[in-house]
């Protein structure tokens, strides 16, 4: 598997990189994991009615430097921005013995195992996809997840809040879940928490372990 750290890249550019990787993998090429941070962007998934969960007029978003993109991933509306690790695995899920739901659960396990390395207990919520943590006496989302499987090969993936400016999530109803807070590694652990580089390194290792692969990084 090839691992590419794309650095800070606009959402549409990273989407194009996904599509190029998808073509290679669908044709039998080496599987790929793309890692990226996005400038501030709000994206809609394919779930109908996601526009209702946008709380801020588009002109105001533009003035704030927040892009708005209609994606083809699963799920509802979410925010991506600096301080958030976005991981796009481009893999042939059948090669790993996985169904679509099994693949989603494998991604959730990668995140839960990563958080555990830093003393954070991630968990699942039977009523909502993603990874959650107990914070302030209630469940808060720390990692959003939205995928698409086309020709047996995955696109899109996970967005893990490490040092994200959480105020941006006030612009939307995150994932369409009203009254459900969003949190981050930094909010939970404070200044003693790991850097985004530390978390990215752990995420890669847990991805390799979960999918039983070796990888070369570029």
Image: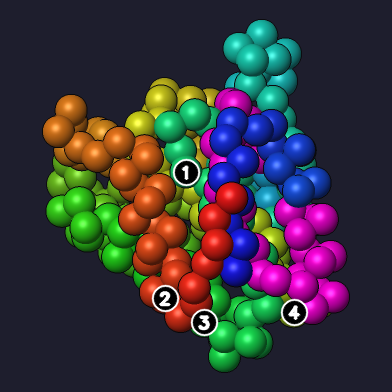
SS for tag 3? helix
Check if residue 20 falls in the magenta segment: yes
Q: Which residue is mark 3?
A: 102
On screen, residue 195 above or below 63: below
Q: Quadrant of residue 79?
A: top right
Residue depicted at x 43% and y 32%: 83
Question: As displayed, is residue 121 above or below residue 95?
Answer: above
Which residue extends farthest bottom? 97
Quarter holding residue 9 = top right
- Cβ atoms under marks 2 and 1 closer than 8 Å: no
Counting residues from the start of the chain, the first of labels 4 and 3 encountered is 3
User: For mark 1, what is the residue?
Assistant: 85
Say which mark, if any, is on residue 152: 4
How far across and how far down the image is residue 199, in percent? 34, 47
Provide the residue designation for mark 2: 210
User: Where does residue 192 sit, x and y in percent of width and height?
Assistant: 14, 33
* Mark positioned earlier in the residue sequence (2 or 1): 1
Work out how far the residue at label 4 is from the one at label 2, CA to CA, in angstroms. Answer: 19 Å
């Amino acid at each position: 598997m090839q691992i590419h750290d794309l650095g800070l890249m606009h959402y549409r550019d990273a989407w194009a990189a996904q599509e190029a990787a998808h073509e290679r993998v669908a044709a039998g090429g080496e599987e790929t994991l793309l890692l990226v941070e996005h400038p501030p962007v709000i994206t809609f998934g394919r779930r109908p009615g996601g526009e209702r969960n946008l709380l801020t007029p588009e002109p105001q978003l533009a003035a704030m430097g927040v892009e708005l993109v209609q994606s083809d991933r699963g799920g509802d509306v979410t925010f991506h921005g600096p301080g958030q690790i976005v991981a796009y695995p481009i893999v042939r899920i059948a090669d790993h013995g996985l169904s679509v739901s099994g693949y989603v659960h494998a991604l959730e396990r990668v995140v839960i195992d990563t958080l555990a390395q830093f003393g954070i207990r991630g968990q699942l919520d039977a009523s909502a996809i993603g990874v959650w943590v107990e914070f302030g006496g209630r469940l808060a989302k720390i990692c959003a997840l939205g995928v698409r499987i086309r020709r047996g090969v995955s696109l899109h993936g996970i967005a893990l809040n490490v040092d994200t400016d959480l105020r941006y999530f006030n612009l939307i109803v995150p994932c369409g879940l009203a009254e459900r807070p969003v949190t981050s590694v930094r909010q939970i652990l404070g200044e003693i928490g790991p850097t985004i580089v530390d978390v990215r390194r752990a995420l890669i290792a847990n991805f390799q372990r979960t999918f039983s692969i070796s990888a070369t990084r570029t």
